[in-house]
């Protein structure tokens, strides 16, 4: 059996087109501020991509560039200004930050109603409590891919590999909200292969190239690969050994072109959601 390929690029393009149509009907342009501290080349690429994608759907995106030696206090002052700016519906601080700045203090400085990354503890707490909130973009994108692929969550055994605040943990919460039976594994898990073999759905977010082997996957299972890893030869691979897994899984996302494109599309959706909520409550 060869797995069905879940085309994240196509799903993301459809979501962006839907958002562009929605934004065109609004009497205002939603605003998004992307804050970049320093000149990390990978961060600069991500920020440019977010800026371009936002403007393409009609969101007024502004990049705030600050020097690498910016102090935590100065960054928090910038964020406070953006919090108070009524034209800004979403604020995103590109991570990682330089070592003199504590990420947690910065994440907590963002107004939770403008926290389009969904990283603020208030949003994470609301998510855990099942209340409406801004949800982290990558796990939201995975949920959309599962829905698009017609994967039934209720009662399914879902395995999340990784427990980071930005991917693994919120992923587990979303799957739980979808009535899956959820297991979250990490580096202290005793038998990762055995956990994988029990799963109807695997979401791999470990950041370890080709960690999940084909013979770890139950025949017909759905595999969503969030990992993005650069091999020494320059190739980009996921956390799943794709060539092996595609022969066993029922449906699988490729890397690149799977979960990756969904993240920015969901960021744009969060910005529109934040704009509509703020303006209807203000
Ligand atoms: P992270 O903060 O480094 O967390 C990785 C998690 O995986 C940790 O919880 C770690 O366990 C676990 N882990 C690592 N090696 C493992 C192993 N051998 N067995 C079991 N668990 C293992 O990474 P992240 O930020 O969540 O990102 C994960 C991956 O997703 C990365 O490749 C990243 O580039 C990618 N990513 C992609 C997107 C996208 O848009 N597609 C967005 C975000 C991240 P411990 O907690 O025990 O250390």
Image (cartoon, helix red, strand yellow):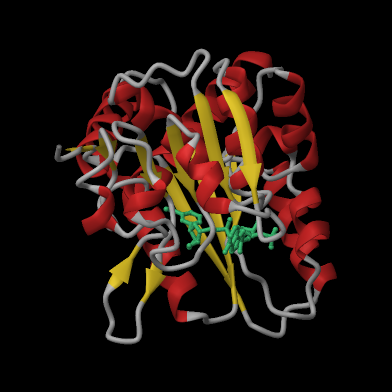
Numbered disc total: 0
Q: Quadrant of the C terminus?
A: top right
* Residue 184 x %, y %: 64, 41
The answer to whether residue 73 is left or right of residue 41 is right
Task: Return the residue nearer the eye: 210 or 280.
Answer: 210
* Residue 90 x %, y %: 58, 41
The answer to whether residue 269 is left or right of residue 192 is left
Residue 276 in the image: above or below residue 82: above
Residue 197 in the image: above or below residue 144: below
Residue 118 in the image: above or below residue 62: above
Identity of the residue furthest to the left in this view? 2
Tell me, yes or no, if residue 65 can be seen here.
yes
* Residue 28 x %, y %: 44, 27
Task: Return the residue nearer the eye: 9 or 172.
Answer: 172
Residue 177 figure quarter: top right
The answer to whether residue 182 is left or right of residue 246 is right
Task: Return the residue nearer the eye: 94 or 272.
Answer: 94
Tell me, yes or no, if residue 24 can be seen here.
no
Task: Return the residue nearer the eye: 112 or 141.
Answer: 141
Residue 73 in the image: above or below residue 224: below
Residue 51 figure quarter: bottom left
Q: Residue at x 48, y 67 (%)?
A: 208
Q: Quadrant of the N terminus?
A: top left
* Residue 264 x %, y %: 40, 47
Residue 253 figure quarter: top left
The answer to whether residue 252 is left or right of residue 193 is left
Q: Residue at x 73, y 36 (%)?
A: 124
């Amino acid at each position: 059996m060869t797995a069905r390929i879940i085309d994240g690029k196509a799903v993301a393009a459809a979501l962006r087109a839907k958002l562009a149509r929605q934004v065109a009907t609004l009497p205002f342009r939603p605003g998004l501020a992307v804050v970049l501290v320093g000149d990390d080349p990978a961060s600069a690429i991500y920020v440019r991509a977010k800026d371009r994608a936002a403007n393409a759907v009609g969101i007024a995106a502004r990049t705030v560039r600050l020097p690498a030696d910016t102090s935590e206090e100065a960054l928090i002052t910038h964020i406070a200004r953006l919090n108070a700016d009524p034209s800004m519906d979403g604020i995103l601080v590109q991570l990682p930050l330089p070592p003199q700045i504590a990420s947690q203090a910065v994440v907590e400085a963002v107004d939770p109603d403008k926290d389009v990354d969904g990283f603020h503890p208030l949003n994470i707490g609301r998510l855990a409590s099942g209340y409406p909130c801004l949800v982290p973009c990558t796990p939201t994108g995975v949920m959309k891919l599962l829905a698009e692929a017609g994967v039934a969550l209720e009662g399914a055994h879902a395995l999340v590999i990784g427990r980071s605040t930005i991917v693994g943990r919120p992923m587990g919460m979303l799957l739980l909200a979808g009535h899956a039976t959820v297991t979250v594994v990490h580096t202290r898990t005793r038998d990762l292969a055995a956990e994988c073999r029990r799963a109807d759905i695997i979401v791999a977010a470990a950041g370890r190239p080709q960690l999940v082997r084909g013979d770890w996957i139950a025949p017909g299972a759905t595999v969503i690969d969030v990992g993005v890893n650069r091999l020494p030869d320059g190739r980009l691979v996921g956390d799943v050994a794709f060539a092996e897994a595609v022969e066993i899984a029922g449906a699988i996302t490729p890397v690149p072109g799977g979960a990756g494109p969904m993240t920015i599309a969901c960021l744009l959706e969060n910005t529109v959601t934040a704009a509509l909520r703020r303006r209807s409550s203000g």
